[in-house]
Image (tube, rainbow, N blue to C red):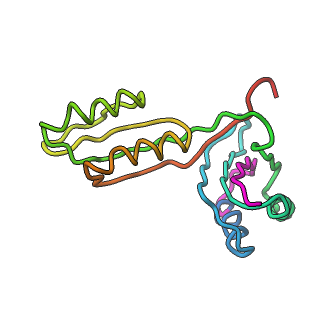
Amino acid sequence: MSTRHTIAVLVNDQPGVLQRVSGLFGRRGFNIESITVGQSEEPGLSRMVIVTIGDEQTLEQIEKQLYKLIDVIKVINLSISPMVGRELALIKVNAEPAERPEIMGVVETFRASVVDIGSRNLMVQVVGDTTKIDAMIELLKPYGIRELSRTGVTAMIRGNV
């Protein structure tokens, strides 16, 4: 059965590492649903958080292939432990002045915020898990989404691990 997996990959902070990791997925026919990369707590190392869909065998193959890349230091399957996963989305939505109170109700319900106001649109920022972001997008679609940008998931294991 195919399920969503979130994998953290600690890599050397070197040019070309992102290309090699994403290329590995493409060559093996694995799809990347989202990927985020940033500095880690260790100087000289970056943390990639990759969300992919597949069965356990696919995930095992991905982990084995990642470890074959020279700049990969550690691979952690975050999905097998309680984790916190978050994503940020910026959504530019059509918002005539008469519709704004209704849209603001959606924004407040999702604990989102308006970060820009134009004469005929609002830009909303929402942070949460993928399900929350998807739900907010669905509720804003009837107003007309003009532009959408999502960061992809970043995640960590909960607790003292």
76 left or right, relative to 145: right
The reply to whether the magenta stretch includes residue 3 is: yes
Which corner quadrant of the image does residue 117 belong to? Answer: top left
Residue 60 locus on image (x, y percent): 85, 59
35 left or right, relative to 106: right
Q: Residue at x 75, y 47 (%)?
A: 10
Instruction: State the residue in front, 136 or 20.
Output: 136
Residue 71 locus on image (x, y percent): 78, 57
Q: Residue at x 30, y 47 (%)?
A: 92
Residue 141 locus on image (x, y percent): 32, 51
Q: Residue furthest top?
A: 160
Q: Which residues are magenta?
A: 1-16
Instruction: State the residue in front, 67 or 106.
Output: 106
The quadrant the N terminus occupies is bottom right
Which corner quadrant of the image does residue 112 belong to? Answer: top left
65 left or right, relative to 50: right
Q: Residue at x 61, y 42 (%)?
A: 154
Residue 15 locus on image (x, y percent): 64, 60
Q: How many marks?
A: 0
Eyeballing the image, is 19 above or below 76? below
